[in-house]
Image (cartoon, helix red, strand yellow):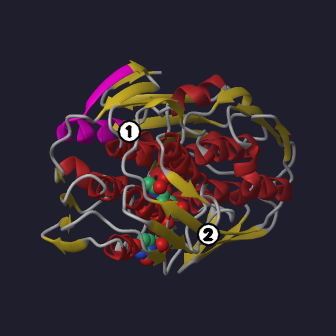
Amino acid sequence: MEKFIVHGPCKLKGTVKISGAKNAAVAILPATLLAEGKCHLENVPDISDIRSYCKILEALGAKIEYLSKNEMIIDNTNVTSAIASSELTSKFRASYYLLGALLGRFNQVQISLPGGCNLGARPIDQHIKAFESLGATVEVRNGNVYASRKEPLHGNSIFLDVVSVGATMNAILAATLAKGNTVIENAAKEPHIVDLANFLNSMGAKIKGAGTDTIRITGVEKLRQVSSYSIIPDQIETGTFMVAAAATKGDVLIQNCIPKHMEPITAKLIEAGATVEELGDSIRVTMDQIPNSFTVKTMPYPGFPTDMQPQICILLTIASGTGMVIENIWESRFQYTDELTKMGADISAHGSTAIVKGVEKLYAAPVHSHDLRAGAAMMIAGLIAEGDTEVYDIHHILRGYEDIVEKFNKLGAHIEYVKEDDKHD
Ligand code: EPZ
């Protein structure tokens, strides 16, 4: 069994460099399927979700040359299969991007129903609606999604009933090579959507308006190879280090990030009493007081990201007064609060709201990572707690954070990765 042991408390101090964005990379990797020739990608995060995606692409016939830890050339010329129905595909959510990408290239596509973090119901009705609007037929049966088309997809108007990152990405992927014009209304505006559109445009796609709620796509016949594309820095990894710096009353310079993407998190940290300085592509976070309490509501971008909700909640556990967390995206994103209670936090979560009364200290306890971001929150809780916090189910954390132990330890934390009886830093 794997676990992290976080020896607390500590003050984080120093410099950390942010890796490429997981949620951009998991769309850009399948997007390479639309191109003829090779795609050279840089700043690809070295995380288990990406390693899984590479295996899925290789099983479909892709040739991947790894130039370094964060750089690869993907050649999809010999991809002849559009059946991605495996244990691996069903393990993580972002495998659904294979549907949009493969539908652009093949008449019949089959993938396993996507898995991923357990955050409550995760329907794909809006993805299906988008594919059907473009002329595909989609069926879900026996744990698989089957999508087919009798002729090339055709452009259309797609109005998404809910603002969905995944459905927006999939609609873009499917519409890129469709005949004619597509307009996606009520589109999601997250930075990773803009990154996907920029990547596809660098291959010759005609996508306008990504980052607004109306995206217009003029279908093109084919895409060309990409000599080099660098994935944007990870917004959520940046936010995780920003919150960790503030929670430990530290002083951290976070490099290789995009401060504009961080505005909702920056605003909350300032409300909590931290100092946040934007310095080009870096952000410095310092904190020298007990955090003020605050209310945070998760919203689609540019609102406060749901993927930062568990981490920011750690600040409230040690804040002066009572704060509130309102989760508007996922129905089961408060499972981690039971773990924090074991550490002495005073939280009551019901439905979409958690009320958090600040306490003087958290104390170490064995805790579980219920999902990727909850796991990161457990690590931050361990950094501020008295004693040695054991964090279990760390495979969730390793799905999305590159070198997380090394990065925290370089900032002065003392975290051990332990596998069975075999202990090493
Ligand atoms: C993406 O998931 C992210 N995953 C999630 O991050 C993130 O929490 C989420 O967007 C919201 O920002 C990836 O990018 C791989 P949605 P996604 O479709 O695309 C409802 C992480 O930790 N909905 O934007 O699956 C849905 O139930 C992960 O990195 C429908 O009703 O999320 C939810 O309430 C966890 N029908 C809301 O929309 C649909 O067809 C937003 O979901 C699709 C979604």
SS type, badge 2: loop
Where is residue 375? Give x, y as percent. 49, 49
Q: Main secondary structure of the magenta part?
A: helix
Mark 2 closeness class: few <14, some 14–19, many ≥20 residues within 10 Å = some
Instruction: Give the residue drawn at x 24%, y 51%.
Output: 89
Q: Quadrant of the N terminus?
A: top left
Q: Nearer the viewer, mark 1 or mark 2?
A: 2
Q: Is 202 contained in the magenta span?
A: no
Look at the image and give the residue range highlighted in magenta.
48-66
Where is residue 314? Give x, y as percent. 65, 55
Where is residue 59? Give x, y as percent. 18, 39
Identify residue for label 1.
Answer: 50
Q: Is 64 contained in the magenta span?
A: yes
SS type, badge 1: helix
Name the kind of residue labelled 1 in the image.
Answer: Ile
Name the kind of residue labelled 2 in the image.
Answer: Asp
Q: What is the number of the mark on residue 202?
A: none
| Dots 1, 2 in contact, CB < 8 A | no
Mark 1 closeness class: few <14, some 14–19, many ≥20 residues within 10 Å = some
Picture layout, residue 161 above or below residue 167: below
Instruction: Give the residue drawn at x 42%, y 39%.
Output: 398
Identify residue for label 2.
Answer: 213
In front of the other: 111 or 204: 204
Instruction: Give the residue drawn at x 19%, y 36%.
Output: 61
Toward which corner of the image does residue 219 lie, by quadrant? bottom left
Picture layout, residue 30 above or below residue 19: below
